[in-house]
Amino acid sequence: MILYHGSNCEIAKVDLAMCKPFKDFGQSFYLTTILTQAREMSRKVADRFGGEPVVNVFEFDDSDLASLKIKKFEHPDKEWAEFVMANRSRNLKHPADDFDLIIGPVANDDIATLFRTFAIGVISIEELVNGMKSRKLNNQYAFRTEKAVALLQKRSSI
């Protein structure tokens, strides 16, 4: 399976220590199956931090996943929303810490307002989930451990 990572630089070797904490699925190396999503992210990262937009292309050997602890969310639901909120928190235990690889929807900028209004108690978790149902969300693969990263092989940059 081919996965893409949008950045402002070429990534020859994944270094999990360089990944930012408090993201949807915690401190992870994030990739997607959607090239246009990675291209958009590379432009955002380059605009924010300098450099040129780069999409790093990886092959994911998903033939032997039995050795990994994987969490997969098929669609945004209450469990997914609570999982994302906990991982973004600086105060709660991060449930992502229990997994090598997490796959699911992206809580992107389009739904950031929904998450903020839920976080401050203006809307309920049910209203948050209902608000996401009408939106088309992209996907993300969060590689959280060296064991998971070992299944990635760099192919190219575009």
Image (cartoon, helix red, strand yellow):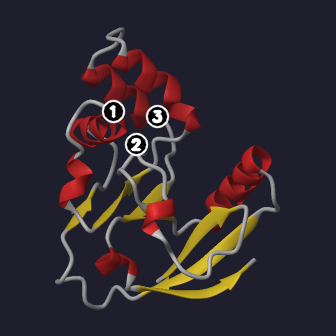
- Amino acid on which disc 2 is placed: Phe
- Circle 3: element type: loop
Name the residue rendered at 28%, 16% in the picture. Answer: 124
- Which one is nearer the viewer's eye here, 45 or 130? 45
User: Residue 52: x, y in percent?
Assistant: 82, 62
| CA separation in Å, label 2 and label 1 | 7 Å
Give residue 90's mark: 1
Q: Is residue 129 left or right of residue 60?
A: left
Viewer-side residue, 146 vs 2: 146
Q: At 57% from the left edge and 36% from the top edge, which residue is drawn?
A: 109
Q: Which label belongs to residue 134?
A: 3
Element class at badge 2: loop
Question: What whole-number distance in Å separates the C-alpha atoms at marks 2 and 3?
Answer: 25 Å
Bin the neighbour count of mark 2 within 10 Å (Cα to Cα): few under 14, some 14-19, many 20 and up.
some
Q: On screen, 107 above or below 56? A: above
Quarter in which the C terminus is drawn: bottom right
- Going 35% across and 25% down the picture, which residue do you hit? 128
- Above/below status of 136 relative to 1: above
Tell me the amino acid under the disc marked 3.
Answer: Ser
Look at 41% across and 64% down and name the residue there: 141
* Marks 3 and 1, the one that precedes in the sequence: 1
Q: Identify the secondary structure beneath mark 1.
A: loop
Q: Tell which tag, 2 or 3, sits nearer the viewer.
A: 2
Towards the viewer: 35 or 91: 91
Q: Which mark is residue 22?
A: 2
In the picture, residue 48 is in which quadrant?
top right
Return the residue nearer the eye: 55 or 52.
Answer: 52
Residue 47: x percent and y percent?
Answer: 79, 47
Question: Does the CB distance between marks 2 and 1 fall below 8 Å?
Answer: yes
58 displayed left or right of 120? right
Mark 3 nearby-residue class (10 Å; few <14, some 14–19, many ≥20): few
**What amino acid is found at the position of numbered circle 1 in the picture?**
Arg
